[in-house]
């Protein structure tokens, strides 16, 4: 059921965001100098983020592309808020793997 809801939200997000400018995550993804980065993949990641994460969380994820060490620091943090965010980030990562990798 959860995958169905995400799929519905993603499909509506993709339709409405295709003509929009690149968002923060897409820009960070494209500028991260990774060989697998493409406009299509980074746009899909942006769409999943828009469906699953609030603006503050999206900004935080974009920073992970620029400085991967921040993600490691968050993962290892003992702060309850970081632990909650990390659980949500893992769900986001799984959704990206499900909907963006072909």
Image (spheres, helix red, strand yellow):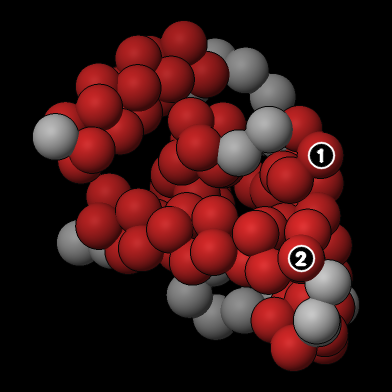
Q: Is residue 31 visible?
A: no
Task: Tell me the residue at 48%/75% (across/down).
Answer: 36
Task: Tell me the residue at 50%/37% (across/down).
Answer: 52
Disc number at residue 80?
2
**Would you name the residue on which mark 1 appears?**
56
Which quarter shows the N terminus? top left
Between 64 and 42, the one lying in front of the other is: 64
Q: Position of residue 15 (x, y in %)?
A: 37, 14
The image quadrant of residue 77 is bottom right
Query: From mark 1 to mark 2, how far is it between C-alphas?
Result: 17 Å
Mark closer to the observer (1, 2): 2
Left or right position of 14 against 76: left
Task: Tell me the residue at 27%/50% (across/down).
Answer: 99
Q: Work out whether mark 1 precedes mark 2 in sequence or the reverse, and give the earlier one.
A: 1
Task: Tell me the residue at 25%/27% (across/down).
Answer: 5
Between 16 and 72, the one lying in front of the other is: 72
Q: Position of residue 96 (x, y in %)?
A: 39, 56
Secondary element under disc 1, as helix, strand or loop, is helix
Secondary element under disc 2, as helix, strand or loop, is helix
């Amino acid at each position: 059921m959860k995958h169905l809801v995400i799929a519905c939200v993603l499909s509506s997000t993709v339709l409405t965001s295709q003509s929009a400018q690149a968002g923060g995550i897409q820009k960070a993804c494209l500028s991260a100098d990774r060989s697998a980065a493409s406009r299509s993949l980074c746009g899909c990641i942006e769409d999943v983020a828009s469906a699953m994460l609030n603006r503050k969380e999206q900004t935080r994820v974009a920073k992970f592309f620029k400085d991967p060490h921040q993600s490691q620091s968050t993962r290892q943090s003992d702060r309850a808020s970081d632990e909650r965010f990390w659980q949500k980030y893992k769900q986001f990562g799984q959704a990206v793997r499900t909907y963006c990798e072909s």
